[in-house]
Amino acid sequence: MQTNPYFENYINNLQKEIFLLAYDYKYDIVSFITVYMKSDIRKELDKPYTFWHNQPANRILEEILDNNDIKKVKVQRINKDAVEWLGFFYSKWHFMTGESSRSIIKFLPSKEGLLSFYMLHQLDESEAIEICKRQYNLSRNNHRNNEYKNSKESYKKYDDKSYYSFLSVKILYKLNKNKIFNELDYISDKEDDDYDFVDRNYVIGIRSNVIDDSNNTSIIDEFKAINLEASNYKVRSVISIYFCYINSSKYKEDEGSSKLLEEINSLKKEYTPSNRRFSYLYFYMNGKLYEITPSNDLYIYTIPVSERDRAGIINRMTKYYLDIE
């Protein structure tokens, strides 16, 4: 999200000051932050330039209190440093990703944010955001399990390999909720050793792959070949992603998923971050997404694909003049 750095810094500090005023006046700070982040005023502050950008912190505080029933407490039991940090962090998150404040507080509720202060405040903001989103996705897995069991689309197989390239972008957006994935461009005239998608600023590059019965190989052998090719890429991105779809009968459900996990762990040991060309590795089979991070940690998510997702993917493919049944 492109903004004037002076304006961004002003809003970050304005929000920090609002939180501290509510804290000093002994309003229940967890309730206040929740109400504020979901308020119409913060919604206006999310926009480029509005009336509320010119209002002082105490004026905004008064407006929030006039329109909401927020109780006072005798003693604040939350560290004041945590309140100050969270006010800045929420605003910084908005400017870094373009996500609305209502969306941000869904990923990191105010109580969790305040309690996570000691763990998160020493990290780079981008790392802290990634951790918050990962925890959110893990906590939603039980809900998604039910959703994905009823999603026939998660189990369907298609012959069009380019469809899976576009699907990789969709799944990564569902995982990260980062608008940068909407800005990725498909490299329609790519050579065999190029990315499938890059964004215009070369922040993210994605190389997708499909393992099906036509190339009945292991995920380890496939990755070895593509990891070697990656050394010849013409475009190097800040974050490089390898995304592999597993449609092979070699990895059947139940016994296949345990075999897949075993091979993923073997690959993780053999290809540590210093020995591979990709920051993140993803493997996807029947609604299950396996992620290997730049720190070589393994996370497993349930990310189902719906018919609506497929329709959106096909619509995006048509914009690149790609035909698909």
Image (tube, helix red, strand yellow):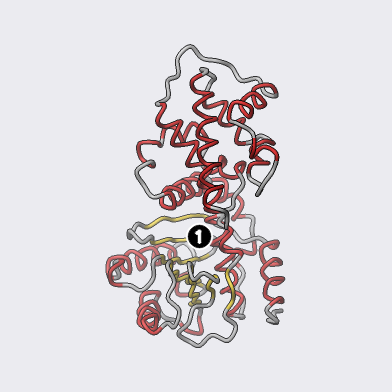
Residue topped by disc 1:
288
| Observer-nearest of 56 and 285 | 56
As drawn, the residue found furthest toward the top would be 74
Q: Is residue 117 left or right of residue 185?
A: left
Residue 236: x %, y % from top left: 42, 75
User: Which residue sits at x=67%, y=46%?
Assistant: 49
Figure quadrant of the N terminus? bottom right
Name which quarter of the figure residue 160 lies in: bottom right
Residue 258: x %, y % from top left: 40, 62
Q: What is the number of callouts on the image?
A: 1
User: Which residue sits at x=50%, y=49%?
Assistant: 137
Amino acid type, label 1: Lys
Q: Secondary structure at mark 1?
A: strand
Q: Is residue 52 left or right of residue 18?
A: right
Specify few, some or many for label 1: CA neighbours under 10 Å numbering under 14, 14-19, or 20 or more: some
Task: Give the vertical position of 46 relative to 166 (above or below).
Answer: above
| Observer-nearest of 112 and 309 | 112
Task: Give the vertical position of 194 relative to 27 (above or below).
Answer: below
User: Which residue sits at x=69%, y=43%?
Assistant: 50
